[in-house]
Structure formats: C-alpha cells, structure tokens
Image (cartoon, rainbow, N blue to C red):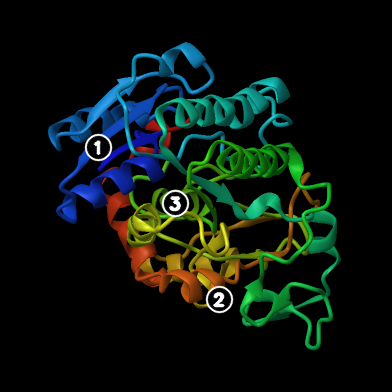
C-alpha cells in the first residue's frame, strides 16, 4: 500500500510517518510539505533517512499534485491549525481558507483522478463556541467541569459527542474544517472512493511547535522549563480551562484499520482523543510543571480572547465501538516526553516561532 501524508514535516504528520516506519510498515510512504512553518524543515532529512520520499509542494497549488506518484491513500495532516488564524495578524482570512479549504479540494481532486482513499484529520474546534460557552461549569480540583445534571445534548461525563451542535460561530478555522469534512464526504460518495474523518483532540508530544494558540501543552511546558513569562488568559484568569490531550502516534493503529476497511460502512466521522482520562486544565498543567521543574509565577488576564472556550473534552466512544480504538499514551507520559525534549532542546520555542 502506498500512502501520501500531507503536512508530513509538521508535528502530527512527521510523528505519524515515523510511527508507521517504527511499526514495520512494509508499504511505501510519501509526503509533501510547503515548509512555511518554522521548525518544519528540521524534520525533512530525518524522514528521508527513514526511506520516506518528501516532496516540497503546496496543497494550495493544484499543479503541485500533477507530478506526485499514484498512491492508495492520502492522510491529510496539512492545515493552519490555529483557532485564531485569520484574525491574529499572522494569517489573513483568505490565506486560512486557501490552506484549509482550497487545499482540501485539491487533495480530493487528486483522489478522484488517482482512485485514492482520503483520511481527513479534522479538529475538535468544529463545535459551536456559543453553545460551549453557554454550558454551566463549576471548578473542581483546579479545573472546570460541566455542572451536575447538565441537560445539553451531546454532553456527558465522557465529554462532547459527535451530536453536539456545530452551529456558527465556530471560528473561521472551524468553519474551514467543517466545510472540508462535508466536501470530503460528498466527493467520496459521488466519485466512489473511501473517506474517513477523524476529529482529533488537542495533539501534544515532544517536537511540537508550541504557541499559545496551538500546541498549548508543549508551549506551556517549554516556557515553564525556561522560566519564560506565562499568563492565564480568559474566564476567571486562573487557568481552569480544560482540554483533552492526545499523542499523534496513537492515531496510527486507527489509520491502519481505516485503510484496510471494506468501503465506508459505519460512521464516517468519529472523535479521536485522549478523552476524560487525559483532560487537563492549565492550572493542573502548571502544578505538574512546578513539581517537575520547580515553582514559576504565572500572570493573570481575565479578559477572554476571541473564540476562547472554558471546557472541551471529546467523547471518543464511537471510535472505540466502531474500530476498537483507544489512546495508549497517558497524559503524564506525554508531559514527561515534552519536558525531556525541553531539557534537550532549550531553544526549541525560538527555533519554531514565527516571530
């Protein structure tokens, strides 16, 4: 089997590629990347040494796909992954749409012509910000949790299910991912190729290019280790916001099963996350950092940023039931991996920072 991984030199794409190779994958792996993300170039040579053919190409350019080899599957790990993209001054709204939607169209056209299957790594941020912010929450053990007897549809002790509202606003980023999901499903149905969509929780692990608006756990741990300024932003200004945590290598067993599945039987959209067991607030992450590295002061800014949410954990029971999948890497092990990387690479944030 031949696989093309887009965004292969990013954190998620490179981790997936290495995990395939380390697991003894016997097929051929290809990848493409446009290398606009600082730090991504560092992954190119190591991937080449593993026997992976890495192409310098941009998913926004349809012509860049014309000379790519035929493959059986595309795993789409290429995106501008920031919920603030298009409004933060780093990326324009048009650039965001070109990356996350036009790029999807070009990949789907490739799949149509080459008869390849398509797996989209989507996001937890497709859900309604208004509805998430309207959930009544309470503080427990330094973290928000939904109030007892919460009646909201699609919310349980396991987290938010795929039935939760995706009504606007979801951010420009979230809107491009929802549109990409819908287009992928329609292309697959119309032109007869398999499509799977995995809505992923917060990715984290060593080598992630951490920033406050993405890769938050890597950013927080690296910054703490370096004693760089940190700030709790939004809501009560105490870091009680909660997200789940997933190491991208845990995706690979699921991807293998999806590529070997017969057609598209069953649900085609599923959550893939660390779930409630991996959930962590910034305050709890700070407590872990203080024990690991020693005390460090964190400033407070209660004013919310655009698109901030207090709590979001993905319920991945559908993936568990349909695919027999569950995450293997504990949150504590993810954090320790990042901490050791921070000790080995003390200038990592500077090397992977845009400006």
Residue wearing tag 1: 29
Q: Position of residue 241 (x, y in %)?
A: 67, 64
Residue wearing tag 2: 276
Indicate which label's residue lies in the foreground, 1 or 2: 1
Residue wearing tag 3: 218
Tell me the CA gap for discs 3 and 1. 27 Å
> Who's the residue at 31% across and 27% down the image?
70
Q: Position of residue 332 (x, y in %)?
A: 39, 71
Question: Dot 2: few (<14), some (14–19), or many (≥20) neighbours within 10 Å?
Answer: some
Q: Is residue 277 above or below residue 38?
A: below
Q: Secondary structure at mark 1?
A: strand
Decide which of tag 1 and tag 2 comes sooner along the chain: 1
Question: Dot 1: few (<14), some (14–19), or many (≥20) neighbours within 10 Å?
Answer: many
Q: Nearer the viewer, residue 188 or 30?
A: 188
Tell me the CA gap for discs 1 and 2. 33 Å
Q: Is residue 90 visible?
A: no
């Amino acid at each position: 089997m031949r696989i093309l991984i887009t965004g292969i030199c990013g954190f998620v794409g490179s981790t997936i590629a290495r995990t395939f190779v380390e697991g003894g994958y016997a097929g051929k792996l290809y990848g493409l990347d446009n290398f606009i993300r600082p730090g991504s170039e560092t992954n190119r040579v190591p991937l080449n040494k593993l026997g992976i053919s890495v192409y310098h190409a941009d998913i926004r350019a349809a012509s860049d796909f014309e000379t790519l080899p035929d493959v059986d599957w595309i795993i789409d790990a290429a995106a501008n992954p920031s919920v603030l993209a298009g409004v933060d001054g780093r990326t324009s709204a048009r650039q965001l749409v070109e990356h996350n939607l036009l790029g999807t169209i070009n990949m789907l056209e490739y799949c149509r012509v080459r008869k390849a299957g398509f797996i989209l790594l989507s996001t937890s941020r497709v859900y309604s910000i208004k509805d998430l912010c309207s959930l009544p929450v309470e503080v427990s053990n330094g973290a928000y949790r939904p109030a007892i007897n919460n009646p909201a549809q699609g919310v349980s002790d396991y987290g938010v299910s795929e039935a939760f509202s995706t009504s606007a606003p979801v951010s420009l980023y979230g809107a491009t991912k929802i549109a990409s999901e819908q287009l992928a499903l329609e292309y697959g149905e119309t032109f007869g190729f398999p499509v799977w969509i995995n809505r992923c929780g917060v990715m984290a692990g060593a080598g992630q290019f951490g920033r406050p608006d993405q890769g938050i756990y890597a950013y927080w741990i690296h910054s703490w280790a370096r004693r760089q300024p940190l700030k709790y932003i939004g809501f009560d200004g105490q870091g009680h916001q909660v997200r789940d945590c997933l190491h991208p290598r845990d995706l690979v067993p699921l991807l293998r099963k999806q590529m070997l599945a017969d057609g598209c039987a069953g649900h085609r959209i599923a959550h893939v996350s660390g779930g409630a067991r991996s959930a962590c607030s910034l305050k709890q992450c700070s407590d872990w950092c203080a024990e690991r590295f020693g005390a460090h002061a964190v400033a407070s800014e209660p004013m919310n940023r655009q698109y901030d949410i207090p709590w979001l954990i993905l319920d991945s029971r559908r993936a568990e039931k349909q695919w027999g999948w569950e995450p293997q890497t504990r949150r504590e092990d993810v954090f320790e991996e990042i901490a050791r990387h921070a000790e080995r690479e003390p200038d990592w944030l500077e090397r992977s920072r845009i400006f």
